[in-house]
Image (cartoon, grey):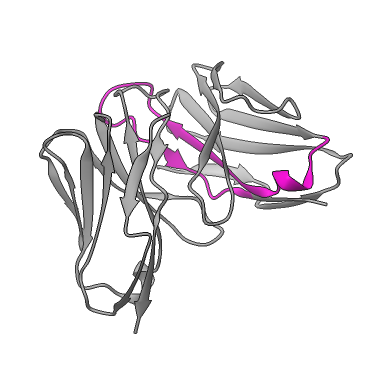
Amino acid sequence: GQQLNQSPQSMFIQEGEDVSMNCTSSSIFNTWLWYKQDPGEGPVLLIALYKAGELTSNGRLTAQFGITRKDSFLNISASIPSDVGIYFCAGQLRNSGNTPLVFGKGTRLSVIA
Amino acid sequence: DTEVTQTPKHLVMGMTNKKSLKCEQHMGHRAMYWYKQKAKKPPELMFVYSYEKLSINESVPSRFSPECPNSSLLNLHLHALQPEDSALYLCASSRDRGPGAEAFFGQGTRLTVV
C-alpha cells in the first residue's frame, strides 16, 4: 500500500522558535493536506495544496507542494504554546472525493514556554 | 459551515452490547468516511460511502456495520466488539471530486469496550 514518510517523529522547541516538518512519498500525489490533532479530538485541516510548486500560507503556517509531487513541507513560524499537538500530512492520489487519504505517521510537537 | 458532528463523544460498551455511532454533516458533501484511530497512530480508513453507496470496505470485521441513510447521515453499528476495538472513531466528509475534495473530520467518538 501507499506510505508517507513524515519527519521528524517528534519535536521539542522553545516558544518563539520556527518549526519545519515534511513528508515524502514514493508515489505521486494530486493533493497534499496538513492536519493538526489535539488529544481526544478529530484532526483539523490546516492547509490544502493542489498544484505542484504551490506555496500556501494560513497565518503563521506555510506549506508547499513539492515540484516532483512526491513531497510537501509545513513550516510554523514564531511558535506559541497552543501549537502543541500532532501534525499529520495526508496525500490523495486523485482529485476525487472518494479517494481515501494516505496519512503520514505524524509529528508530535511540544512547545516549551 | 465546515462542521461534522459525531455522537456520542464517549461510549463504554460491553462485548455483548449493540450500539451505534452517528455522524452528520450539512455541507452537501457526497463522500463520507469512517476511520479508526489508536493512540499515537494516524487514522486508519474503515469505510467510504459515495453518494450513499458503500464504495470501499477496508476488510473491516463484520462486527462493524456501516449505514448511510441519506446524504447527510452516516452511522456505524457495533455488535459483539472486542476490547482491542477500543479506539477513537472518526467520521469525515468531503466533496465528491475535484480540487477542494479535502476531508473534514468530526471530533470523534472515544469507544471503550469492556
Q: Nearer the viewer, residue B74 or A95?
A: A95
Q: Residue at image x 20%, y 70%? A: A18
Q: Quadrant of the N terminus of chain A?
A: top left
Q: Residue at image x 21%, y 59%? A: A75
Q: Is residue A54 magenta?
A: no
Q: Is residue B111 left or right of residue A99?
A: right
Q: Residue at image x 30%, y 75%? A: A80
Query: Which x, y percent locates residue A106?
Result: 40, 53
- The answer to which image quadrant residue B17 occupies is top right
As drawn, B109 above or below A113: above
- The answer to which image quadrant residue B77 occupies is top right
Query: Which x, y percent locates residue B66?
Result: 66, 26
Q: Nearer the viewer, residue B57 or B94?
A: B57
Q: Residue at image x 40%, y 24%? A: A99
As drawn, B6 above or below B56: below
User: Start and end of the magenta stretch?
Assistant: B80-109
Q: Is residue B96 magenta?
A: yes
Query: Which x, y percent locates residue A111?
Result: 35, 76
* Residue, far bottom: A113
Q: Is residue A24 left or right of residue A66?
A: right
Query: Which x, y percent locates residue A69?
Result: 18, 34
As drawn, B94 above or below A64: above
